[in-house]
Amino acid sequence: MSLTSDPPIDPPTEPATGPPTGPSTGPSTDPPVDPPAAKAAGPGADHEALTVVPVRHPWRWVAIAATAVLLAQFLNGLITNPGWEWDVFAQFFTAPTILKAVWITLQLTFYGTAIGFALGVVLAFMRLSASAFLRTVAYGYIWAFRSIPLIVQLLFWFNLAYLYKELQFGIPFGPGFFSFDTMNLVGATSAAVLGLALHQAAYAAEIVRGGVLAVDSGQLEAASALGIPRFRQLRRIVLPQAMRSILPNAANEIISLFKGTSIVSVMAIGELFYQVQVVYGRNGRVVPLLMVATVWYILLTTALSVLQHYVERHYAKGAVR
Amino acid sequence: MSAPSDAMVEIRSVHKRFGSLEVLRGIDLSVRPGEVTVVIGPSGSGKSTLLRTINHLEKVDRGWISVDGTLVGYRRDGNKLYELREREVLRQRTKIGFVFQNFNLFPHLTVLENIIEAPVSALRRPRKEAVAAAEKLLDRVGLADKAAAYPGQLSGGQQQRVAIARALALEPRLLLFDEPTSALDPELVGEVLDVIKDLAHGGTTMIVVTHEIGFAREVADTVVFMDEGRIVEQGPPADVLDRPTQERTRAFLSKVL
């Protein structure tokens, strides 16, 4: 199949000029095809010399042009509209109060994710347990925490001290050994972490359970036929394979938790969104300060997405697709 | 020790039911050390289930099974059989190799990692020792150059040979094969059967569930024909395959030969 003897096909670079006539490739709107080549399709023609003419997409070029114009207008507005106040943005983007708030947001995300997924793994295996009691308790937890809006939960935790004045460690229903003043133990930040983590655990449990169920049952069978210890079967055989389907969902959850930390602003914790509100409450520059928060959220979400890519690649070892 | 005999495998009046379906209806079978037993029979006759009860992948409802003089899955005390803890069952299984129809290799581990996983984690072998043994086994199944490959990069026949090497890595007293060539393309069956034949001639005790009648004729010391959860007929291949005494055996063989 040599194409060398044929005239080159015109690449479809030029946008359609006249009124396009749909997907037709008739000779009126298209660059002329070399007549001998066109006729070569007849019987007894030299089939070696036949070339393939790709179908033209004039409407696609119209759509591209329209989109490009809109995009250019938007970018132009970002630069030229003085309302964005980019100088105010630059002044506050790396201001110490904002950086400190970014750090608190990251901490909330980290602890919320770590505690949430640790508890989620436990709940997932409870739901997969042979015991109906454990299954029901885990399901009840997931049902409750998925049903209550996060903001309501957070306010409950914030007011924990109203319900329980002190927390005691001791024999259940019996005497206590240590006790803590709830107000001191559950400060605003730990109440926020607790709320985020308990909420996250309900979702993480279902994601982990889904991942474990996606692993072929023959894998566990082979592992137990080989006498591999139970915990090792889970850690070495099941979880690494489950990670393949857990990761995309888990990344979604972590990213939405990261942005969800902005809800914590109702508890007057100095995370990013709260801090930005404090600043624009003082100086009245609402839009540039919202942009400060927005750009930080975008940057850090991008970083998480990049991380996700590499973690997924790690767990794709040996995968065919 | 409840099986005072010289048999490697002793199966006594084993019954197994899945819901309302009685899959095994009283199986008695003995396998002597070094012997190759081939189990044949139509689909649904219970032959795979029987094989899976031997390493306790399926629990029996009645009867008992012993391997190398030890009850599988239970401990006998007087007239009672106490179910063993999972940890103890797992330890028993390290003495019984099992090869699956669908290979069940661990796809996220390399060929070498697949083979050394059980020796290292279940038998606590030093990793170096396990690797050296694994390389020898890979050489034996003709895949010495595939140690670093992932299962997904191998053909079905190669995967099943790795699975056999993985089972052998525990140096089991008994090898169980559950239709080891049924998931393979026809042209790959031969290479797997050759490995199994090689093991059979080497004196490994094994029980093979298969549809390969030619293989049974060539390798088996005993052929067992099962139908509807019972052993219909058993004996040397020359008897069972060429001069079957039971009508059902004849009917089955006339369809597969």
Image (cartoon, rainbow, N blue to C red):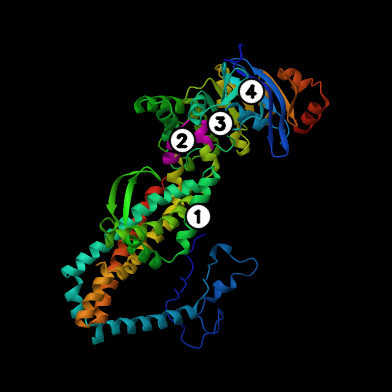
Pointer 2 indicates a residue of which chain? A
Evaluate if marks 1 and 2 touch, with contact meaning CB atoms under 8 Å apart.
no
Disc 4 versus disc 1: nearer the observer = 1
Amino acid type of the residue that numbered disc 3 sits on in the rendered structure:
Val
What is the number of the mark on residue B64? Answer: 4
Residue flagged by tag 2: what amino acid is it?
A: Arg
Q: CA distance from mark 3 to mark 2?
A: 20 Å
Image mark for residue B99: 3
| Residue A318 appears in view | no
Query: Label 1 to label 2, Cα distance in Å?
Result: 27 Å
- Please report contact status of discs 3 and 4: CB closer than 8 Å, yes or no: no
- The label number, if any, that marks residue A140 in the structure image: 1
Return the x and y of residue A66 as percentages of the image width and height. Answer: 41, 83
Residue found farthest to the right: B247
Of residue B165 and residue A213, the one placed in the foreground of this image is A213
Q: Label 1 marks which chain's residue?
A: A
Q: Depth check: A231 or A193 in front?
A: A193
Location of residue B190 (image quadrant): top right
Pointer 2 residue = A230
Q: Nearer the viewer, mark 3 or mark 2?
A: 2
Residues at discs 2 and 4 in contact (Cβ within 8 Å): no
Q: Which residues lie in the magenta part?
A: A221-236
The secondary structure making up most of the magenta span is helix
Nearer to us in this view, B167 or A225: A225
Q: Is residue B188 magenta?
A: no
